[in-house]
Image (cartoon, rainbow, N blue to C red):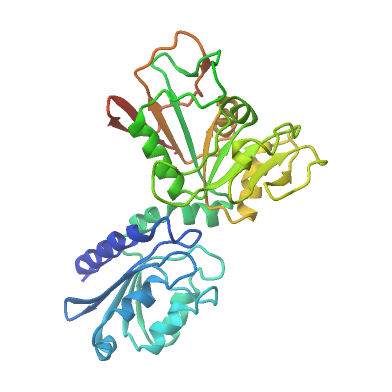
């Protein structure tokens, strides 16, 4: 039976991928309903605020009377609390589904085993822990957020063949693209997927970035920048978007306005941990640290990162601003992006 359970949970994981980014800050879950070795219903988590996977799967069943003789497979424990939607465990009980196979327990404190217990108390047979690691990996942002009380942190930069991220001297106030148009499009795709992008003061002053999604269809991320002294005007591109940017500053004279929301931090203290705590309180589940070297290096030094995405360009600068330094003992993947290489490292 375990082999069959794994087969259907693997299908749940395939379904869950379809809602991964739209569902945040909720987890994306896949659900499959099986009657006599036939799938009669499937679903995955709707965009944030919408129906959960179990609800969508149950709604897809053409003959609801079969639910009383079926097994529900779900990659994450059905919820047990009222949030934006009613508890999925209550729905499973109401539909009299006799058997439920769960990939992994929900780490969210308001669930965390209570949905499983509620179904067991109702007389449902519940199996837990099928393809557990894979189910946790499919929601790594959600698990990081709830278990470590911080966002899932992705470091991202592009560097030349000789290890620089930018030339020493600029001819204009604009981002320096060492990588090509394909890599730029990929970065914009990431912007549509992750909840926030963060840059340092120097990057804003030198590049005047907007941090918006322009070369890919999708939403803009929350734009965050560091500005210890409060020296960056609201006229800069990062502050001129539809939604206000978030500025982390030590200058308490800076007051929030229609362009910018100011949050205060002690820049002489553990700034990285303060940022993590701040973003956790703001319910930001994932963040890409895009620059510059000093900002990224602070996260590396604090060992507060989960993934590093590094573009290796064919360009040779000869001199410039050194790229961040990271111990490449981590798991590494390399992708060719039209003659550029993208290395993806995972923190151990």
Q: Does 159 appear above or below 248?
A: above
Residue extending furthest toward the right: 253
* Residue 271 at x, y percent in the picture: 68, 37
Q: Does 103 appear above or below 187?
A: below
Q: Does 32 appear above or below 303?
A: below
Q: Is residue 322 visible?
A: yes
* Residue 188 at x, y percent in the picture: 42, 41
* Residue 122 at x, y percent in the picture: 42, 87
Q: Nearer the viewer, residue 309 or 191?
A: 191
Q: Is residue 24 left or right of residue 19?
A: right
Q: Quadrant of residue 207?
A: top right
Q: Quadrant of residue 2?
A: bottom left
Q: Split into 4 quadrants, where in the image is the C terminus?
A: top left
Residue shown at the point (44%, 48%) measured from the top left: 192
Label tally: 0
Residue extending furthest toward the top: 318
Q: Split into 4 quadrants, where in the image is the N terminus?
A: bottom left
Q: Nearer the viewer, residue 21 or 235?
A: 235
Q: Does 309 appear above or below 67?
A: above
Residue shown at the point (51%, 59%) measured from the top left: 25
* Residue 115 at x, y percent in the picture: 47, 76
Residue shown at the point (53%, 26%) measured from the top left: 174
Residue extending furthest toward the left: 37
Q: Is residue 120 visible?
A: no
Residue extending furthest toward the bottom: 65
Q: Nearer the viewer, residue 347 or 254?
A: 254
Q: Nearer the viewer, residue 112 or 170?
A: 170
Q: Is residue 138 left or right of residue 82?
A: left
């Amino acid at each position: 039976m375990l082999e069959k359970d794994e087969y259907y949970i693997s299908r749940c994981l395939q379904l869950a991928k379809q809602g991964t980014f739209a569902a945040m800050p909720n987890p994306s879950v896949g659900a499959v309903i099986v009657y006599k070795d036939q799938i009669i219903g499937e679903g995955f988590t709707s965009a944030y605020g919408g129906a959960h996977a179990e609800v969508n799967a149950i709604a897809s069943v053409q003959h609801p009377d079969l639910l009383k003789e079926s097994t529900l497979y779900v990659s994450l424990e059905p919820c047990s609390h009222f949030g934006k939607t009613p508890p999925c465990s209550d729905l499973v009980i109401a539909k009299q589904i006799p058997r439920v196979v769960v990939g992994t327990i929900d780490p969210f404190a308001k669930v965390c085993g209570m949905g499983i217990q509620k179904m067991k108390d109702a007389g449902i047979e519940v199996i837990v822990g099928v393809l557990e690691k894979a189910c946790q990996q499919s929601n790594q942002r959600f698990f990081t957020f709830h278990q470590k009380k911080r966002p899932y942190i992705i470091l991202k930069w592009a560097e030349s063949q000789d290890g620089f991220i930018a030339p020493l001297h600029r001819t204009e106030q604009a981002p320096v693209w060492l990588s090509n148009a394909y890599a730029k499009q990929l970065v914009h795709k990431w912007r549509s997927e992750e909840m926030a992008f963060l840059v340092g003061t120097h990057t804003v002053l030198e590049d005047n970035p907007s941090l918006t999604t322009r070369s890919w269809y999708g939403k803009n991320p929350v734009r965050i920048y560091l500005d210890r002294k409060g020296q960056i005007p609201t006229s800069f591109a990062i502050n001129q978007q539809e939604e206000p940017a978030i500025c982390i500053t030590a200058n308490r004279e800076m007051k929030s306005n229609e362009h910018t929301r100011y949050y205060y931090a002690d820049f002489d203290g553990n700034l990285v941990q303060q940022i993590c705590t701040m973003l956790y309180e703001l319910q930001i589940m994932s963040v890409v640290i895009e620059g510059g070297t000093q900002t990224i290096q602070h996260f590396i030094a604090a060992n507060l990162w989960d993934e590093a995405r590094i573009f290796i360009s064919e360009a040779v600068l000869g001199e410039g601003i050194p790229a961040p330094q990271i111990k490449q003992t981590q798991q590494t993947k390399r992708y060719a992006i039209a003659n550029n290489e993208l290395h993806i490292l995972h923190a151990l």
